[in-house]
Image: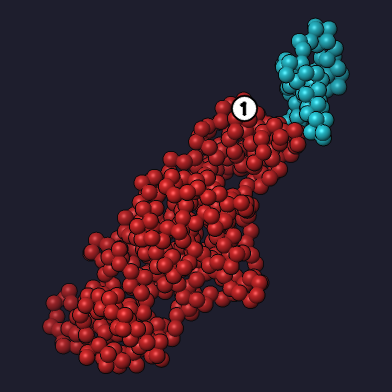
Chain colours: A red, B cyan
Amino acid sequence: MKSFNYYLDKIGEVGFVESVTKSTAGVVGLPGACPNEVVLFETGQLGQILSLEPEKAEVLVFSEIPVKSGVRLSRTAEQLAVPVGEELLGQVINPLGQLLSFGGRLRRPKQWRVIKKDSPGIEKRTQVCQNLETGVTVVDLLVPLGCGQRELIIGDRKTGKTSLLLQTVLTQARLGMTCIWTVIGKDKDEVAQIEDFFQKQKVKEKVVIIAASAQEPAGLIYLAPFSAITLAEYFRDNGQNSLVVLDDLTVHAKFYRELALLANRFPGRDSYPADIFFTHAALMEKGGNFKISNNKEVSITILPVAETTEGDLGGYIQTNLMSMTDGHIYFDKSLFSQGRRPAVNPFLSVTRVGRQTQTALFREANRELMAFLTQYQKLESYVHFGAELTDEVKATLKRGERIIHFFDQKSSALVPANLSLFLLACLWQDFWPLDELIERYFQNQIFRQQVEKAITSSPNFASLIKKVQKESLK
Amino acid sequence: MTTVNLTLAFLPSKSLVKKLALWFKKNFGSKVVLDIQVDPKILGGAILSFNGYYRDFSLKKKLERKLKNF
């Protein structure tokens, strides 16, 4: 970025700030300004044209220090660009690419990339076909995800959404995936906690944290997911798969509403601006599985978060997001209060492209398990009548209880998908030393190899069960 | 009402201001306000900004451009 006088001289247009709000400025002048153009204030702040009227323009200000009325500003004839590069891995940056973390060394990328809203067309995309392991049993078995999927994580506040995301990012980072964690309008504490978590788990070098906490100017918060996606696109063009977490988009929508209302845009439903759907859809469209040169496939997986109030899935932003994504994982507050962790409700969760990425074995296990859980749920409601139970019903209830227990997972524990499936097969056999098996898997390499082998060599669930019988009952 | 910002290197005499005012009145009608600032740092010439356009005709700028080529 050059100096104010440079642009003033080069472009020959000047504007004056006429009105100021917390995060926008109304300016006059700048006859040649175009939408989304970057403007520079005399006092050094950076801004972006938000909306244009015949005599006036509304400018988004990206600085904590508000601009003053009467200050001059200049066009730059440039679109907003953010620094991108491998150097950012392991760092905490703000959406404009400025460094926020103080620990570690400072590495500045050399490349810049313009934030674009259009995304590649159908000819550049391929089917989602690779599984994305989350390390969370209930998700891996019941709501599987694929690389390139856009899966909404939805639920009330404090129901464990962030924990699931942390587990997923940790699993993927360990598998070598490049991860981008975007904090949108949250507390500063949370940013520190997330950074600390990745540091402790020793995967910080695989994660870029883009943070726009609630104290930042609304313009920066609005920009955060776009900045994250631009970075993911850089990795895509470099042939690296990436996983983008956007936490969360309901807050993003609220900040965008604030901006749009301040810029005098006409309010739509719930006072959100008319283009809120477009704004979020433009983000979601960037995800997918892409063809790049040499017949290689690269994916951008996006996991946006939406917060609900009192479990209401019908909110405006929530339903918008549901219609843009390839399914959602629903965190149920009532399950949470029953003590289920993670509180994922498998019946209300959807995955549209995840199952096609599973092996036949996993798919079959998924079907069996889902059918069983439906039956179990029905039976459970019968039991309330106090009817006398047959042995068969008792066995089903017992197995159901065990499955619920089996899905319980500490937020610090990661269970590989293969282990999950193996344990499920054990459970189907009513062979049930759960903790012992998990411990054995992590400590005994031979046992681990046996498990992997049993899974890769079983064509279907029945044969896996047989193998389990032979292997583990020894 | 539009404002013409004019930066000069010297304090203009009354007759010069009158002359300028007349010129603007003739070319843009009576709805123009002349806002004259004095900044000796521009050495000579004038900087004009009007209707969002900004033109720097100062001697300082001219010298800067010349010196850049050396």
Query: For numbered disc 1, what is the local secondary structure?
Result: loop
Closer to the camera, A347 or A217?
A: A217
The residue at the far top in this view is: B14
Closer to the camera, A390 or A280?
A: A280
| Chain letter of the residue carrying label 1 | A
Q: Which amino acid type is marked by label 1?
A: Val
Placement of A50 over or under A20, stated as above or below: below
- Density class for disc 1 (Cα within 10 Å; few <14, some 14-19, many ≥20) is some
Residue at (28, 72) in percent of width and height? A407
Query: How far across and down, in percent of the image, does residue A381 sit?
Result: 22, 75
In the rendered structure, the answer to whether residue A346 lies left or right of residue B56 reads: left
Q: Is residue A8 visible?
A: yes
Residue hosting label 1: A71
Residue at (40, 90) in percent of width and height? A457
Placement of A426 over or under A171, stated as above or below: below
Query: How far across and down, in percent of the image, does residue A339 sit?
Result: 23, 64
Quarter of the N terminus of chain A within the rendering = top right
Placement of A122 over or under A105, stated as above or below: below
